[in-house]
Image (cartoon, helix red, strand yellow):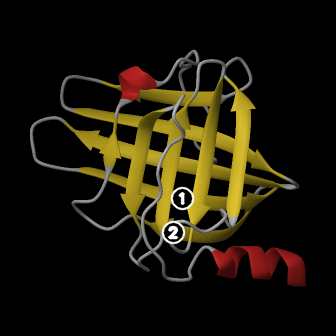
Amino acid sequence: MLARTLIAIAFLLPGSALACGSTEQLAFSCTTTRGTFIEVCQAPSSIHFSWRKKKGQKPEVESRVSNSSLLWTGEGDSQLGSDDLFFPHGKLKLNLSITSNYHEDGTSADLFVFDGYQRLSTIRCESGTVNFARDVIKANRGINRDNSH
């Protein structure tokens, strides 16, 4: 329990920006409401989630999965789209949930940290800082039929 709490708390500490590697493309980035940074970078054969407190520091939390192993669900119509990217992190699951409103300014995002079906933490992205390039992601996108998370 203590380890899960410490990991959840680590997401809430302040920091600054990150950068993708030279062979990666930026698929997602945001500044959280606590001043930390989340980034998802697409490499040729894998996708990489990172969270850091400060620029230049080693990531506090990271997960890299192959394109074929990424669970990417979503749905949408001409007005609203949603995407959920699921990254494993030890016993935890990191669910990056992105909502795009095509007729109004704004894409919002939240990071949910799960242990099984128990939500340990929710980290919100600051309004106006969310950048999402859906077309950069090379994994297959499925349709989310399970609304539990």
Question: Residue sitting at 71 percent across and 17 percent down?
Answer: 68
Instruction: Name the quadrant of the N terminus.
Output: bottom right
Percent position of residue 143, x then y: 53, 22
Q: Which mark is residue 111?
A: 1
* Residue identifier under label 2: 123
Q: Position of residue 14 (x, y in %)?
A: 49, 82
Q: Residue at x 42, y 43 (%)?
A: 28
Does residue 32 lie above or below 139 as drawn?
A: below
Measured in 3D between alpha carbons, the distance from the residue under mark 1 to the one under mark 2, in whole angstroms, is 5 Å
Question: Mark 2, residues whose alpha carbon is within 10 Å: few (<14), some, or many (≥20)?
Answer: some
Residue 83 makes an appearance in the image: yes
Q: Is residue 49 above or below residue 138?
A: below
Q: How many marks?
A: 2
Q: Residue 75 bears which disc, if any?
A: none
Residue 139 x/y as whole percent: 58, 19
Instruction: Look at the picture and state if 38 lies above or below 132.
Output: below
Q: Residues within 10 Å of mark 1 (few under 14, many from 20)?
A: many
Q: Is residue 74 left or right of residue 68?
A: left
- Cβ–Cβ below 8 Å for labels 1 and 2? yes
Residue 1 appears in the picture as rendered: no
Which residue shows up at 72% across the image and 59% down it? Answer: 114
| Residue drawn at 35 percent across, 32 percent down | 133
Side of 12 where 80 appears, left or right? left
Q: Tell me the SS state at disc 2.
A: strand
Reading the chain from its start, which is encountered first: label 1 or label 2? 1
What residue type is disc 1 on? Answer: Leu
Q: Amino acid at mark 2?
A: Ile
Q: Secondary structure at mark 1?
A: strand
- Judge by depth and name the residue closer to the eye, 122 or 58: 58
Q: Nearer the viewer, residue 97 or 90?
A: 90
Q: Position of residue 59 (x, y in %)?
A: 65, 62
